[in-house]
Amino acid sequence: MEQTKYITDKDIQALVGNLLRVGVYLSMAIVVLGGVIYLTEHGGEKIDYAVFDFNKVSLKTVEGIFSEVLSFKGAAVVQFGLLMLIFTPIARVLMAVISFLIEKDYLYVAIGLLVLAIIMASLSGGFAH
Amino acid sequence: MSVLLFTLIVLLGAFLAGFLGSLTGLGGGVIIIPLLTLGLGVDIHYAIGASIISVIATSTGSAAAYVKEGLTNMRIGMFLEIATTVGAILGAIITVYLNAGYVAVIFGCILIFSSLMTLKKKVDHTTLDYSSKGAKFFKLNGSYPVKDVETPYAVKNVAGGFFMMLFAGTLSGLLGIGSGALKVIAMDNIMRLPFKVSTTTSNFMMGVTAAASAVVYLHRGQIDPGIAMPVCIGVLIGASVGAKVLVRTKTDKLKIVFAVVVTILAIQMIYKGLSGGF
């Protein structure tokens, strides 16, 4: 029994490793693309980040970023890539939950779901205000 | 300053931060924040938002390599993530109510502490004492390959490690850093894990923890695409180059030189924070 468990773990871990790599590369590619668009749009403008202003960044919610990304404005594409990057480790937790489910380790299915619930609660935006 | 020039300077600075952060084991976050705030006059809240993104990028990138080696203890990671994510969200909520000066002072102190930790000789605390009830209940004891031989290890003081992780998570959310130094204390010294397991498991948790605080920052408008974009690209490339150089170079002397530089930066952050410069 110990042996079979080890093999499942290994298979899942290889899969998880690939997921992480693809997630990082893909999101960084989107960020770079967005960055190029952003610089062609705003490259010559003056910047000022000296004072933090809540209202300066307009793309602050998951829904907002998803609906703006197809406009192909630089800032929206960058935010979309950053959002993909944020989702990558979260997807990893989800995959870990699935692997614990396959192993019938229900204690860790519950722990994994708890971690996901904590992040989802935060994702809903309720904690930011 | 024009957007283009700012982007180029930040890209270069972030590259250096990622490079040195990976060579010394400090991480890119603790270096990019002083660069942005002291060097370019960026508000610390924007710097924190950009830094947390770079923490996700670098830790997730290196975790991809580690998981395949079977060193990461997924159960320990998942269990402690309850503490780090709750802490991270708490920290991210608190940070906006704190005066930027106080944030800078706390940051400076953590920076000095972390750089001292990189100089400290590592002492192996591993044990085969399986008496911990918490470790047994949560199935945390494990094994890892040492020269292709599966070597078992026992975990101690689960509650102590959990609370230390809560603290590490809070600082991560508060300051936008990975707080690797604190995670290593919790796992090496308190829970008695082998180095390789604690380093890789801490990396596994860092991405998830940073993602939890990043969503709070995002909703608050602290993640500005104009800063986060060059920061995460630069840090990620710098960290990958650093990891390649690290394999071939002895870093002991570099660590001392770098600890001195980081301490000077930290003192500047504390001074500026106390004198109301933020």
Image (cartoon, rainbow, N blue to C red):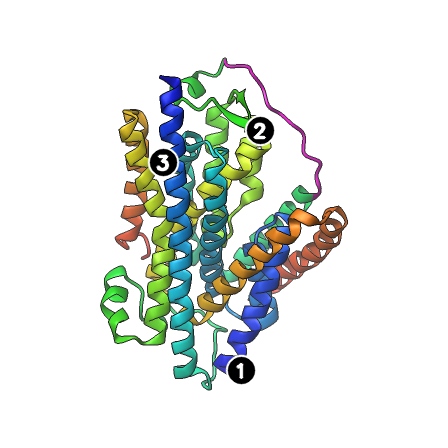
From the image, state whether disc 1 or disc 2 is nearer to you.
Answer: 2
Can you tell which mark lies on residue B194?
Answer: 2
Q: Main secondary structure of the magenta part?
A: loop
Distance Cα–Cα, label 1 vs label 2: 48 Å
Q: Are marks 2 and 3 on the same chain?
A: no
Residue on which the image places disc 1: B1
Name the amino acid type tagged 3: Ile
Q: Residue at the location (53% across, 82% down)?
A: B1
Q: Is residue A25 above or below residue B250?
A: below
Q: Say how many tags the image has.
A: 3
Provide the secondary structure element on which disc 1 rests: loop
* Front residue of this view, candidates A27 and A5: A5
Of the image marks 1 and 2, the number of the one nearer the N terminus: 1
Q: Amino acid at mark 1?
A: Met
Q: Report the span colored magenta.
A: B119-130
- Give the residue at x 49% y 68%: B230
Q: At 38% from the left edge and 60% from the top edge, which residue is drawn? A: A27
